[in-house]
Image (cartoon, helix red, strand yellow):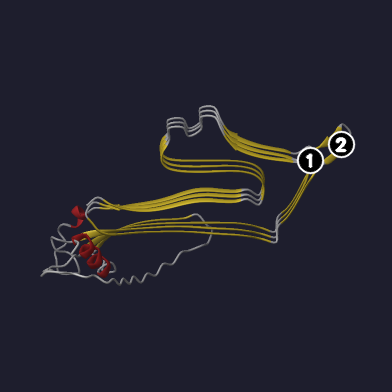
Amino acid sequence: MNTNLKRTLMALAVATLFGASMAYAHDDSGSGNSVTIRKHVSLSTNISIWGDPSISGRIDVNSAAIALENGTQSTNWNAVINDASTSNNSSISGNAGEKSSGNVGANVAAGDDNVQANAAALSASSAASTSGMGGDWNGGGSSAGEMADAEAFADQSAAFNGTANFGTSNSASIGGNAFENASGNIGVNVASGDDNEQLNGLAAATTDDNVYATATTSTDQGSSDNHTLNTSSREFCGIELMSNNASLSGNAFEGASGNIGVNVAAGSGNLQANTLSMAAASK
């Protein structure tokens, strides 16, 4: 019988039996929002075994690292009128962010009612900090291990927004050497126009003696009852055409590494999200 499978089964059985030590990181980028998580884990499997295997002992959990990131964005009941004299231009170019490292967030917006966010929750736990706890309560023994749990959520909604563009120009771009050879957790949002929502979210949990790791990510986007009129405008000098241009060009992000989330939007009512949840075990 595969010993890794045995270990996984037993770790799931004790997942809710935390020890006395817990590391917890929480980011909630919404205003007045909360996240409630209730977990019930069940596992069934059919295994055929030949021979005379013998299994004994148990796996205990003595500490936990939990990271929770919850991003909520909404744009509702907005009204915008743009004429031919309106030009929304947002860009990141040149050497911006080149060779940057660590947790890097950049938001650039031009227009009205744009919503942007970069959020991260990180948590780490080390069993070494609980070595003196003893072994009488659900996993304080010398064979006890740790669990890592990462949860990332994104909720975006747009409703009942009205936008009228008469020969308006919206341009969003990332170019040049922007963020070239950057590393780490990098979130970049560039938007031009109206009622655009952009989000980059990360939840990461790690332990150094892991017996159980779980990661969950969920993205919920809803757009309804929005109205956009894009048309040309007749001015004294001729006809001004409506344009939306979004681009990622040049050497942008060349050689970059890590968790990279990039959103580029031009226009109205665009919803964009990048989320990652990661539970890592070093054992």
Query: Could you say where residue 146 lies in the image, as x and y percent from the top left?
Result: 24, 59
Label whose residue precedes the other's in the sequence (1 or 2): 1
Q: Residues within 10 Å of mark 1 (few under 14, many from 20)?
A: many
Query: Could you say where residue 45 lies in the image, as x and y percent from the top left?
Result: 28, 71
At x 87% / y 36%, what residue is drawn?
Answer: 235
Query: Could you say where residue 126 lies in the image, as x and y percent from the top left?
Result: 23, 53
Quadrant in the picture for residue 67: bottom left
Taking 92 as reference, is 203 above or below it? below
Residue 84 located left or right of residue 75: right
Q: Which residue is disc 2 drawn over?
A: 235
* Mark 1 secondary-structure assignment: loop
Taking 192 as reference, is 12 above or below it? below
* Mark 2 secondary-structure assignment: strand
Q: In front here: 113 or 40?
A: 40
Name the amino acid, label 1.
Gly
Q: Quadrant of the N terminus?
A: bottom left
Name the amino acid, label 2.
Glu
What whole-number distance in Å separates the C-alpha atoms at marks 1 and 2? 9 Å
- Let me know if residue 246 appears in the view: yes
- Let me know if residue 61 appears in the view: no
Pointer 1 and pointer 2: residues touching (CB < 8 Å)?
yes
Q: Which residue is disc 1 drawn over?
A: 167
Residue 122 located left or right of residue 223: left
Q: Residues within 10 Å of mark 2 (few under 14, many from 20)?
A: few
Q: Residue furthest front?
A: 50
Quadrant in the picture for residue 139: bottom left
Query: Could you say where residue 72 lies in the image, as x and y percent from the top left?
Result: 53, 57
Taking 157 as reference, is 174 above or below it? above
Residue 269 located left or right of residue 32: right
Q: Which mark is residue 133?
A: none
